[in-house]
Amino acid sequence: MTTTAERMRAWTGPAILTYGFRPFFFGASVWAALAMVLWLAMLSGRVALPTAFDPVSWHAHEFLFGYLGAVVAGFLLTAVPNWTGRLPITGWRLGGLALLWLAGRIAVAVSADQPAAAAAVDLAFPLVLAAAIGREIVAGRNWRNLVVLAMLAVLALGNGLFHWEAARGDHAAQGYGLRLGLSAGVMMIAVIGGRIVPSFTRNWLVRREPGRLPTPPMQGFDKVALLVMLVALLLWVTLPLSAATGLALAVAGALHAIRLARWAGHRTAAEPLVTVLHAGYAFVPLGALALAAEILGVGPFGMAAAQHLWTGGAIGLMTLAVMTRASLGHTGQELHAGSGTVAIYLALVLAVLARTAAGVWPVAGLLFLDIAGLAWTCAFGGYALVYGRLLLRLPPAKRI
């Protein structure tokens, strides 16, 4: 029987096409940095893209559906073979998926004259990805992870709604599509992060020293916390300014803060590669509580800054944490965060704090936005520089 390693060794093309995390994590990091540079230039009036979206909507779309779409693809194309015991998608099939994602980025950027065609190109990638992942899950009878496929489908639906709202002339950055897509991203972190954070923490602590270990994942409390978060997000998508939504988000935030506290994150300070997982997850309850405060009229952040605790904080930091760990683990490196990795983590945290400060102190908002954009660019540009050598070439042992 052919194994994953044999399939990878048999591939004689570019090293970047040997596993799903390679093209998509590298592409996501480069795009996250480049799109932020473009966004800052658009804010200053130096650049105007020929896109059908208004500038804020383009910014929101490309970081939520563009960047996150690539990271989700890299994660699932790497994780699903482990879940199902089936071979990974490699070679030109993988390259075709990556090119389809890239075509979406280009199509959206130049969509002013043909918005419907651009939407079709952009939506082709998540639909093809969902079909590929769904086939592997069903063929491997891995029914437990159909929930992940469902969340991917919701992310794609949010993208479609975003295009539809923009075509109607709505401000899509504040529409149903954005909230639906962001909700899918938050639930992905709550579900998948709720598995990997305590698991990776336990593995590291067991090897290090005895003492308190994380509560095993997916116990009764976890299921209640996930259900409450799902209800709160559904209310936020449909009734974003309702007091009931604010109260539900507050309860969900409190439950997920307790959930995080049960994972012994305070014992992981000696290894930033583990600590950052807890920090990334912390932005799930922080974002929920901040949005609740804004909806209930007692928040100091402003709605956009509160929302960025989810987009930049939960999604940005958690995906960066997963990308660094997976890149090290799947290329045979020691699971340890070096100085370069710690630097990109800190840059990302600085970006989120600066973006939040822009909402708290609007008089200095442009300065904080510039700081946030520069720090974000350093974080993801830094990832591409530090990890590019691992993603773009095979280690000597894997060479033919």
Image (spheres, rainbow, N blue to C red):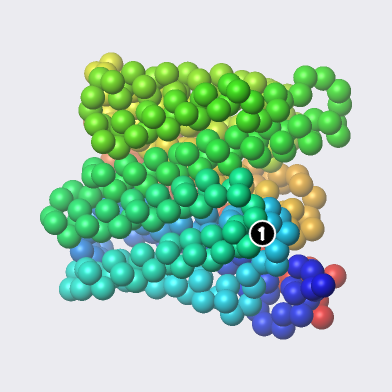
Q: Nearer the viewer, residue 320 or 9?
A: 9
- Total marks shown come to 1
Q: Residue at x 26, y 44 (%)?
A: 176
Q: Residue at x 64, y 52 (%)?
A: 142
- Horizontal side of 372 relative to 96 (left or right) equals left
Q: Tell me if I can see residue 137 in this picture.
A: yes
Q: Residue furthest left?
A: 169
Amino acid type at circle 1 is Gly
Q: Residue at x 31, y 31 (%)?
A: 235
- Residue 394 in the image: state x and y as whole percent: 74, 70
**Residue at the disc numbered 1:** 140
- Residue 267 in the image: state x and y as whole percent: 73, 24
- Figure check: 41 above or below 194: below
Q: Which quadrant, please, contains the C terminus? A: bottom right
- Residue 12 in the image: state x and y as whole percent: 72, 83
- Residue 182 in the image: state x and y as whole percent: 38, 43
Q: Residue at x 71, y 36 (%)?
A: 199
